[in-house]
């Protein structure tokens, strides 16, 4: 099972959202610790989470979402609702990414019970020297993280060009719960890093130079397409972890392997997440 924070990361939603869904009965945790009150979820609950997000983003109130889910809405019916919503939104360019995200969630719903975890690889990740900048955002949701990750990398490249540091590897993004927000904390620190030469000195404080620890046992998967659909690959990792008796540790990393600034559909990232046997 996954903690509230880990489940939020796999689903790419906020911790606050999951707490609200629990309070309203839309998505109850699989178990709750009677002493600490911490919530725990199974990977198969990501299916219901996808359904809730699709219906909510179609403009339905949560009360109606609950009624629809209780009556076991079909994928065909969801597609019909999405077509109606698309007709309302497709004229607005600002909603293109939102519609693409809904389409991706709907594809995940349609694959329920048939998700292929064969592309997941278990391997060791070596330590890497990186230059990085970071910023705190409200949650794991792409609407929060996506606003800062691009500007952070623009600033990294600018400072690296000034410093003359040698870039030796790919950009690596990762997200860590902000200290002080508790085990189920809401705020997340977005780290934008890029691998540099192992002998790169600490510098003058304009950019952080540090050693990103290696991961002895990491589950990895190649994610092809925009990062607004990162939840697709994260949910595949969650299913693999659950199916194979592991539990996640640490935080997920996103290593950028291919970047096309003109077409996010051509992006390729490797997602990495440490795991252990309980």
Image (cartoon, rainbow, N blue to C red):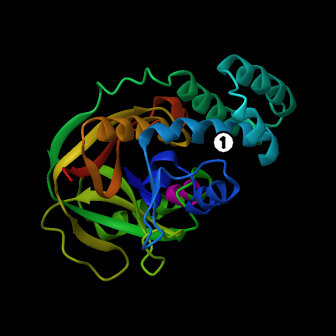
Residue 269 is at least partly visible in this image: no
For this view, does 78 lie left or right of residue 153?
right
Image: magenta residue range = 145-150
Magenta stretch: residue 146 in it? yes
Q: Residue at coordinates 73% horizontally, 37% vertically from top-left?
A: 55
Mostly what secondary structure, the magenta segment? helix
Residue 43 place in picture, x, y as percent = 43, 41
Is disc 1 placed on a helix, strand or loop? helix
Residue 70 is at least partly visible in this image: yes
Q: Observer-nearest residue: 92 or 42?
A: 42
Q: Residue at coordinates 68% horizontally, 36% vertically from top-left?
A: 54
For this view, does 83 lie left or right of residue 198?
right
For this view, does 180 lie left or right of residue 51?
left
Residue picked out by circle 1: 53
Residue 95 place in picture, x, y as percent = 75, 39
Say which quarter of the image contains residue 137.
Answer: bottom right
Q: Residue at coordinates 51% horizontally, 46% vertically from top-left?
A: 11
Outermost residue to the front: 34
Residue 235 place in picture, x, y as percent = 44, 38
Q: Is residue 218 above or below residue 200?
A: above
Q: Observer-nearest residue: 245 or 174?
A: 245
């Amino acid at each position: 099972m996954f903690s509230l924070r880990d489940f939020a990361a796999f689903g790419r939603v906020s911790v606050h959202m999951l707490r609200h869904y629990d309070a309203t009965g839309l998505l109850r945790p699989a178990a709750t610790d009677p002493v600490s009150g911490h919530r725990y979820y199974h990977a198969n609950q990501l299916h219901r989470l996808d359904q809730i997000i699709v219906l909510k983003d179609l403009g339905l109130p949560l009360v109606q979402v609950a009624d629809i889910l209780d009556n076991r809405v079909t994928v065909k019916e969801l597609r019909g609702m999405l077509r109606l919503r698309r007709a309302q939104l497709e004229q607005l360019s600002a909603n293109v990414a939102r519609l693409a995200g809904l389409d991706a969630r709907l594809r995940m719903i349609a694959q329920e019970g048939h998700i292929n975890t064969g592309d997941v690889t278990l391997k060791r990740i070596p330590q890497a020297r990186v230059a990085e900048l970071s910023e705190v955002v409200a949650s794991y949701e792409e609407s929060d993280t996506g606003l800062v990750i691009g500007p952070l990398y623009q600033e990294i490249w600018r400072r690296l060009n000034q410093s003359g540091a040698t870039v030796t590897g790919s950009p690596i993004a990762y997200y860590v719960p902000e200290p002080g927000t508790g085990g189920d904390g809401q705020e997340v620190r977005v780290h934008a890093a890029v691998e540099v030469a192992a002998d790169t000195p600490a510098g003058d404080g304009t950019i952080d130079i540090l050693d990103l620890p290696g991961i002895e046992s990491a589950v990895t998967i190649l994610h092809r397409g925009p990062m607004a659909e990162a939840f697709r690959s994260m949910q595949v990792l969650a299913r693999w972890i659950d199916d194979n008796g592991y539990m996640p540790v640490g935080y997920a990393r996103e290593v950028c392997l291919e970047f096309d600034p003109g077409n996010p559909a051509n992006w390729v990232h490797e997602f990495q997440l440490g795991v252990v046997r309980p």
